[in-house]
Amino acid sequence: MLTVRRYCDTWHENTANTHKPRTRTLYRGYLNNVILPELGDLPLDELTSARVKAWFAKLAPFPTRNANAYSLLRTIMNHAVDEELIPANPCRIKSAGTKKRKVEPIALSPSEIRHIASLMPERWRLLVLVAGFGGLRWGEVTALRRSDLKLTPDDCAVTVARAVARIKKEVVIDTPKTEAALRTVSLPPELYQQIKAHIGTYAGAGRDGLVFPNDSGEVVHANTVRKQLKKVAEKVEMPKLRFHDFRHSAATLFAEQGATLSEHMAFMGHTSVVMSKRYIHANPARNREMAQRMWAA
């Protein structure tokens, strides 16, 4: 008998080469801890929409985890449909796979980003500035190497070619999860001197030297910077500030400069139009400015 458990386990094994190690670990956790305990022993062809709704309704209140688990089950069941093992996907709960924010992100102004960076220990100031003006994810910025930097007085840029992930306390450096994340991001040229000074003082040796290593020359742990950021956040009376808020701020600032949807997606490394659309919206003042330019063109 083909059960939900057996089919999900087979799917997980067969997709081993299509997902990053961290993604595989997350999927295995969702299967073992969220999906299979309740649904695993059901025959695959008896997994109905009613069963899925009952399972989802009983889940503990962890919105992000539940949305991810539901999305995973829906994906696996889509494969079952493609293989003609079931006639239709039983995962039909509207918006169940939509992640709901637990914490509202903070959009910082350029001066706030610079001020917060100035209050950080000197070793981590540039890291904050690159995240706040370049929109890099934590795993991307901490994986940067000297060879990823393009530095001239008029043109500063970083190339995102890899990302750091921690899987069961092991540091894994690999290409980013999506092709869209492979990108080159321009930085304000005003950072030129700070980047040069930082590299000369803190970066690892050689072209492959890490730009933001810890004191031992290894990949910095998130907790190391998080502790320092928490202290600074208290000083500036933003106790809920998280490192991810620097990426959110960069996304907001880039959109406010009039970026098109495609430009914004490329800057942020987004794969989904929906993600960038959150930031791109009509701006009456910019509309007036563009109308005036049309007349003068």
Image (spheres, grey):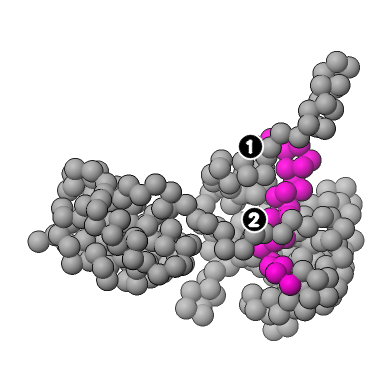
Residue at x-position 17% and y-position 48%: 85
* Label 1, label 2: how far apart the Cα atoms are: 18 Å
Q: Kindly indicate whether the residue at mark 2 contacts the one at mark 1 (C-beta within 8 angstroms).
A: no
Location of residue 242 in the rendering, given as x and y in whole percent from the top left corner: 68, 68
Assess whether residue 164 is covered by the magenta stretch. no
| Disc marking residue 39 | none
| Disc marking residue 262 | 1
For badge 1, the amino acid type reads Ser
Q: Is residue 67 above or below residue 199?
A: above
**Callout 1 secondary element:** helix
| Crowding near the residue tagged with mark 2, few <14, some 14–19, many ≥20 C-alpha atoms within 10 Å | many
Nearest the viewer among 287 and 83 is 287
Q: Quadrant of residue 11?
A: bottom left
- The residue tagged 2 is 160
Mark yes or no: residue 250 visible.
yes
100 relative position to 282: left or right: left
Q: Is residue 9 above or below residue 77?
A: below
- What segment carries the magenta color? 239-260
Q: State which tag comes first along the sequence, 1 or 2.
A: 2
153 relative position to 124: left or right: right
